Image (cartoon, rainbow, N blue to C red):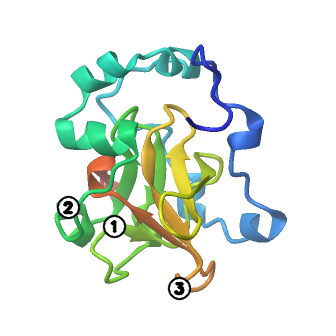
C-alpha cells in the first residue's frame, strides 16, 4: 500500500508528497505555473472524496487496462499508447481523477515506448520505493487519488536529468486551446 495513506482512505500525508527542492523549484517553467488543476470532465471532488473510493468503485470508473495500472501498479506494454507520439501542446492529467500532472512543454521522446517527461508539475506526484525487480526503483503516484503512474529515473535530458516514464493508459491528454488574437 502507498505510504501516507491510512487504512480508512484518509488524505495523502505530507511524507508521501514529492516536494521540489530549491534547485528543482528554480527549474519550474512558466508553463507549469499556468497548469490547470484538472482535466475537464472529471468530478470536482475534494481530496477526501477521492480517497474514499473503494476498489469496486475504481473498477467501475476505469477501463480494465487503466484499473490494472492505476489501482494494481501494473505496466502497459511499451509502444502501445497513442500518447507516446502525441505532439500537440497541452496537459497530461491522471486518468483516475483528472489532476493535471505534466505539461507538453516537458515531454520528450525517450525511445522507451512510454510517454516521458523531464519535469512534472510540482506537488502533484508522490514517490515511493518499488522493490518488485532485483533493484529498487522510484515509483510515482498521483497525490490526489494515489493512482500509479510510472517510474522516475535519473537518465533524462537537461535541465533536470530526470525521465518521468509514464503509462499512457494512466493519463488523459487535453490539448491547449489557442488564444484568439
Element at badge 3? loop
Query: CB of mark 3 within 8 Å of CB of mark 1?
Result: no
The disc, 3 or 1, on the residue closer to the chain's N-terminal end is 1
Q: Which residue is mark 1?
A: 115
Q: Within 10 Å of the Cα at label 3, are there few (<14), some (14-19), or many (20+) other Cα atoms?
A: some
Task: Compute the Cα span from label 2 to label 1.
Answer: 8 Å
Relative to residue 87, is residue 49 drawn left or right? right
The answer to whether residue 53 of the structure is visible from this angle is yes
Task: Compute the Cα span from label 3 to label 1.
Answer: 14 Å
Task: List x then y, in percent, for residue 168.
Answer: 28, 56
Q: Residue at x 32, y 56 (%)?
A: 75
Q: Which residue is mark 3?
A: 157
In the rendered image, the quadrant that contains the C terminus is: bottom left
Task: List x then y, in percent, for residue 162.
Answer: 57, 75
Q: Which residue is mark 2?
A: 81
* Foreground pick, 166 / 159: 166
Amino acid at each position: 500500500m502507498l505510504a501516507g495513506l491510512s487504512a480508512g482512505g484518509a488524505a495523502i500525508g505530507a511524507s508521501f508528497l514529492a516536494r521540489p527542492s530549491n534547485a528543482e523549484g528554480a527549474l519550474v517553467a512558466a508553463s507549469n505555473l499556468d497548469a490547470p488543476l484538472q482535466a475537464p470532465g472529471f468530478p470536482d471532488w475534494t481530496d477526501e472524496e477521492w480517497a474514499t473510493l473503494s476498489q469496486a468503485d475504481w473498477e467501475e470508473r476505469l477501463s480494465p487496462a487503466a484499473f490494472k495500472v492505476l489501482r494494481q501498479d501494473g505496466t502497459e506494454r511499451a509502444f502501445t499508447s497513442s500518447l507516446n507520439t502525441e505532439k500537440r501542446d497541452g496537459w497530461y492529467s491522471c486518468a483516475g481523477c483528472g489532476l493535471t500532472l505534466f505539461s507538453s512543454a516537458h515531454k520528450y521522446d525517450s525511445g522507451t515506448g512510454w510517454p516521458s517527461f523531464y519535469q512534472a508539475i510540482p506537488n502533484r506526484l508522490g514517490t515511493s520505493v518499488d522493490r518488485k525487480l532485483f533493484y529498487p526503483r522510484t515509483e510515482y503516484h498521483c497525490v490526489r487519488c494515489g493512482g500509479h503512474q510510472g517510474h522516475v529515473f535519473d537518465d533524462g535530458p537537461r535541465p533536470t536529468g530526470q525521465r518521468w516514464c509514464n503509462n499512457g493508459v494512466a493519463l488523459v491528454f487535453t490539448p491547449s486551446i489557442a488564444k484568439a488574437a
